[in-house]
Image (spheres, coloured by chain):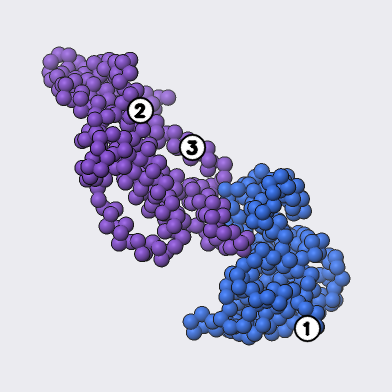
Chain colours: A purple, B blue
Amino acid sequence: MTRILKGLLLPVLVLLVWELSARSGALKAESLSFPTAILLAAAAVVADGSLFKAALETFTGAVGGLAVGASAGILIGVAFGLSRRLSQLMRVTTESLRPIPSVALIPLALLIHGYGFQMESSVVAFSCFWPLLIITEGAVRGIEPRLIEVARVLNFNLVQRVTKIVLPAALPRIFVGLRLAAAVSLVVAVTVEITANPIGLGYALIVAQESMRPDKVFAFIGWIGLIGWSLNASLLRVQLKWFGRMGNWAEHTS
Amino acid sequence: MTQPSASPILSVQNLDFTVGDLNILRDISLSVQEKEFVCIVGASGCGKTTLLRMMGGLLTPTAGCALYRGQTITGPQPELAVVFQDYGRALLPWRTVAGNVELALEARRIPKNERADIIQDMLSRVGLAERADAYPMQLSGGMQQRLQIARCMAQAPQVLLMDEPFGALDAMTRQTLQDEVARLCSEAGVTVVFITHDLEEAIYLGDRVISMDKHPGRLSETLDIELERPRNQLTTREDARFLAYRHRLFNLLPPGH
């Protein structure tokens, strides 16, 4: 408890100095606002429903893109992991597409989809695809060879082999990739909204900035941080729930 | 030697295995009769595991062949169950004890509502009925190997191919498991090929013991073990015939080689 209190000492001190200097006029309140005003703005966007609406839009774009990109990445990652030949055959293609920064695709996505969720999700999907492809391929290749032999001895076909042995064995590591991609998805979704798409939290930030409302800008940044944190925390919970009981196996492989 | 007139359940004919320039197995022929318990002993590196993997269809010989009921073995088949030495790696860590046995039943396409009884039966045969909901990582080494054997038996095999199954276990556990496996296999009427480097284990378990030489791996001698069953860890091992077999094999396979 005392450790938490000690840890809070610095932030509280900073906030206090910030508040006082802004109120006394030493700091330019019109560009940096001050803590109490930010807190009020954060409460106001909750009260008028604009936070909820914007958060839902961003969440839809991020999770939609994550779902599409991650499933494609896992699927192709399993195929590459099982067939070294296929992976080598596709290497030039994957290695030339992978370095493209996902935000560079925003203009292209705009041309194809116009404004809206589809365009945002497609950019998010592209950025979530790669970490899962690479992690899944590595996870599948790293599966205990003895387990593959067990599948062979039991005469499993390809589908059974993948669903009963390969995916469960690779799942702890795939899940780590999913947590990485979830963080990426939020970053990319907000970036797309800030740069192009007139929806969600990113756009709300831009509107607040253009209407010279630093308190609102800070309020939205705070909310975005909180959403990112809770997304990761809930995935971590699922991870512990799923893999916690199997002893130290899941921890070793992840 | 067993008489060639009775058609063997498993046989190996003029089998050769070469990797690059290295001749690992040379001209191996043997046959195993139904319900027979055959032990193959040899020093480490003599290729006995390789030979077993070919009988299980996990490896393809360079020349010659392995046959199951007269048919060439081209790949793994459910009638031939393989018990691996490294039990810890052969179990699915994300499945419970019961779930690991169920895997073999899924492979046999046994309907879901019939599985629970079979699982319970298999687990009680190896003394794991109480641990059905545990995960493999929570079991001792001996229990993990029992679980692997239960899974292999749930496969309803005709032949059990065991690759040094007790090599990594302590002496006490090993003796208990030897008796359990002998009982289990004779109850189920299953044929066993048992690989080991422990001469006494081979004599204690086998109806027949085949010794192997190395560089290249080849069969050297066959010993028919005429000791009554069920065998007893104390009296069988003190039997004069047991000691004579041991003497014989010891001279064929001196330790430290």
Which x, y percent locates residue B94? 57, 48
**SS class, disc 1:** loop
Q: Is residue B239 above or below residue A238?
A: below
* Distance of label 1 from label 2 (alpha carbons): 78 Å
- Quarter of the image for residue B219 reads bottom right
**Residue A70 located left or right of residue A252:** left
Output the chain of dot 2. A
Tag shown at residue A238: 3
Which residue sits at x=57%, y=75%?
B60
* Distance of label 3 from label 2 (alpha carbons): 22 Å
* Distance of label 1 from label 3 (alpha carbons): 61 Å
Which x, y percent locates residue B129? 74, 47
Going by the numbered disc 1, the residue's amino acid type is Pro
* Mark 1 lies on residue: B4
* Mark 2 lies on residue: A56
Q: In this rendering, do the residues under marks 1 and 2 share a single chain?
A: no
Judge by depth and name the residue closer to the eye, A193 or A114: A114
Output the chain of dot 3. A
**Residue A220 located left or right of residue B81:** left
Q: In this rendering, do the residues under marks 3 and 2 share a single chain?
A: yes
Output the chain of dot 1. B
Q: In this rendering, do the residues under marks 1 and 3 share a single chain?
A: no
Which residue sits at x=84%, y=76%?
B226
- Quarter of the image for residue B5 reads bottom right
Q: Is residue A183 above or below residue A13?
A: below
Pointer 1 with pointer 3, Cβ within 8 A? no
Can residue A81 be seen here? The reply is yes
- Quarter of the image for residue A107 reads top left
Going by the numbered disc 2, the residue's amino acid type is Leu
Can residue A184 be seen here? The reply is no
Which x, y percent locates residue B132? 69, 45
